[in-house]
Amino acid sequence: MKCRRCGKLAEVKLKSHHTGFCRECFLIYFQRQVKRAIDSFEMFSREDRILAAVSGGKDSLSLWNYLLEEGFDVTGLFVDLKIDRFSDKARSRVEKFTADKKARLITVDLEEEGIPLGEVIHHRRRSICSVCGQVKRYYFNHTAYQRGFKAVVTGHNLDDETTRLFANTLRWQKQYLENQGPVLPSESKLVKKVKPFYRLSEYEIAAYAYYKNIDYFAQECPFSKGATFKQYKSYINSLEDDFPGTKIDFYSKFVKFIKPSLKSSQKNKPVFHFCPDCGFPTVADKCVVCRLKEEIAQPQP
Ligand code: AMP
Ligand code: ZN
């Protein structure tokens, strides 16, 4: 196959676009896809200070790399979950990347916060995954708000986004569907959240990371997301194999045509108030972080 742009030998084959690119042209294509996402949703501008949540994995390190190369005013944020060796290894990749790029990094250490997740798990019977997700989102927002960042960017890609949309659609999870999309606008003490890689598949980001020599952390969390999520991902990918273009079509048409109509149900949206302990928004009596701090302080039965 020949590169669509220059006619040289194609190295990256993109079935969903019925095309392929050589290395140089792939990087141009990649840059255009991210630019299109940022511009069409007015995610942020060059004047804005933005906070990139980086886990050490390929998506978030690639995104941070992209934003640095494009000259955005971006700072990294790593939440050290304190899940044994897993977190240590992720942290060292993030710190190495920060030093190599002479970038700025903020680290939130959950041990210092009093809720190391490796220990919290012994205090809870429920799956740690949903708690972990909520705790991370809390600190993304808390850090961005306290330090005056305009937006939080995360490395969610097209595969993550379509799989979540597929799962939420199968069950018509209206509440979750309302919150899906490349942008969650700011509201009260909630800082804007954006996903500049939503148009790019895992494969495309892996190719970018490879070309840019990004030394990322590939290990899965020992308490990783349930098997169901992975199974849904494989269904979506086999649909994509048979009908290239399904993923981006499914997702972008949802955002364009379906999501606006869900606005009508905004009146049923759970109202948030402010956590009595930390003052940040929550829909429960207390926010997840303050509840966990309380739980872990109590002696185990
Ligand atoms: P995940 O929920 O693990 O699929 O991660 C989704 C996105 O959240 C990643 O692309 C990162 O932008 C961000 N993220 C995940 N884990 C961390 C972490 N420990 N510290 C900072 N950002 C994270
Ligand atoms: Zn709180």
Image (cartoon, grey):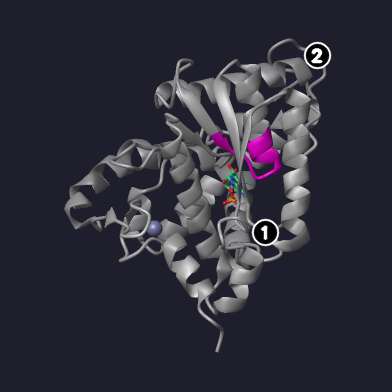
Q: Amino acid at mark 1?
A: Lys
Taking depth in this image into account, of 125 and 163 the one nearest to the observer is 125
**Can you say whether 294 is above or below 48 in the image?**
below
Residue at the spot of label 2:
8
Asked whether residue 280 appears in the rendered view, the answer is yes
Is 247 situated left or right of 40 in this image? right
Residue at the spot of label 1:
82
Mark 2 closeness class: few <14, some 14–19, many ≥20 residues within 10 Å: some
| Secondary element type, mark 1 | loop
**Can you say whether 113 is above or below 59 in the image?**
below
**Can you say whether 251 is above or below 85 in the image?**
above
Taking depth in this image into account, of 240 and 36 the one nearest to the observer is 36
| Secondary element type, mark 2 | loop
N-term-proximal mark, 1 vs 2:
2
Label 1, label 2: how many angstroms apart (C-alpha)? 47 Å
User: Residues in magenta?
Assistant: 52-61
